[in-house]
Amino acid sequence: MTVLVFGSINADFILAVDRLPGPGETVVAPTYRFLPGGKGANQAVAAARAGAKVKFFGRIGEDAFGKVLREGLAAEGIDVGGVGSSREPTGAAFIAIDPAGENQILGALGANYAVRAADVPEAALGPGTTVVLEMEVPPGENAIMAARARKAGSRVLFNFAPAMPAPPSLFADVGFLVLNEHEAEALAKQMQMPERDPEPAAWALSRRFGNTVVVTLGADGAIAISPEAAWRIGALDVTVLDTVGAGDAFLGVFAASLDEGRDLPSSLRRASVAGAIACTMSGARDGLPIRALLDARENELAAARPL
Ligand code: RIB
């Protein structure tokens, strides 16, 4: 079993600000921190810490950030043989966080936009592989990757984040569509569907694409609607420091749990626990839990119940 992440790698620059800026406004922070990030890379680390064997396919720039970020993934035990380079600079995200933990992110995709489905050999796909996709690499390449992975018999998880226009075939080729409530609303609009609230949108999206739709709901946990069953999971009660990377923690642990053969309700519970733990630490990576912590805290959360 392997989790194959086809995704982004970013240098994150974190600024703790007194308040988030409005349009045209300058807000200064006393300093900033450079931390590893990128949705794909964070999800890969979350899956690896949860115990999965992880392979990463992505691109970095020919710069110092790229080198450090690639080494960071390798240090997590991730196979980085699929990390190529690009003449574009390594992707970056400028993240402002206010005292309440609210954030505002400006992303520069850079080398991530050079990621190509052709970089992934056919031999890496198959029934023993769980493929993870997100939206910080070209949507058209995601669509090619999803079609190939589905044909090869892989399980495919797609995190529709950040919400941007994407080919409709992409959604139909993935077994699991994972998104937050804002992304669910954006996708329903993109698909010209009338539903706006998370639960009706999840039902409608699942009917439209014939797959399992998971909508994360922050402190309210998550719902999962599949053609066969529907589930609701709560969330651990934690003190939130910042929510950056919480969605990535959820996705990576969800992928790792399905990959090791857990069923949907059990995978949802571990993913929700991971998402909450991620909120208790600053930055996207520091809060990603290791397997032992997931095992220790899983039972604090009531099992998923049918919707
Ligand atoms: O999901 C969090 C990630 O989104 C950050 O690490 C940042 O790189 C942005 O892309």
Image: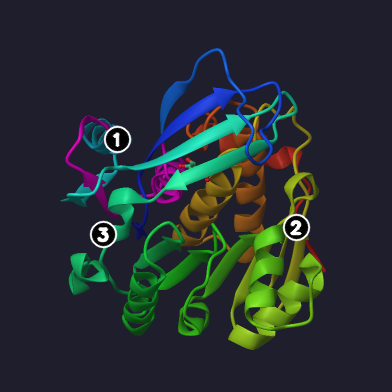
Q: Nearer the viewer, mark 2 or mark 3?
A: 3
Residue 141, how many percent across, how many down? 33, 71
**Mark 3 or mark 2, which is nearer the start of the sequence?**
3
Q: Nearer the viewer, residue 103 or 35?
A: 103
Residue 166, how many percent across, how many down? 49, 74
Q: Residue at x 44, y 43 (%)?
A: 42
Asked if residue 54 shows in the view, the reply is no
In the figure, residue 75 lies in which quadrant? top left
Up the image or down, 149 lies above or below 57; here it is: below
Q: Nearer the viewer, mark 1 or mark 3?
A: 3
Report the residue marked by disc 3: 114
Q: Residue at x 79, y 71 (%)?
A: 196
Element type at mark 3:
helix
Residue 281, how many percent across, how many down? 59, 26
Q: Nearer the viewer, residue 23 or 294?
A: 23
Element type at mark 1:
helix
Query: In 3D space, how far apart are the residues under numbered discs 2 and 3 (Cα atoms)?
Result: 39 Å
| Residue type of the residue flagged with mark 2 | Ala
- Colour scheme shown: rainbow
Q: Residue at x 46, y 21 (%)?
A: 33
Name the mark on residue 69.
Answer: 1
Q: Residue at x 51, y 75 (%)?
A: 175
Name the mark on residue 304.
Answer: 2
| Residue type of the residue flagged with mark 3 | Ala
**Mark 3 or mark 1, which is nearer the start of the sequence?**
1
Q: Nearer the viewer, residue 265 or 134?
A: 134
Q: In this image, 82 relative to 288: left or right?
A: left
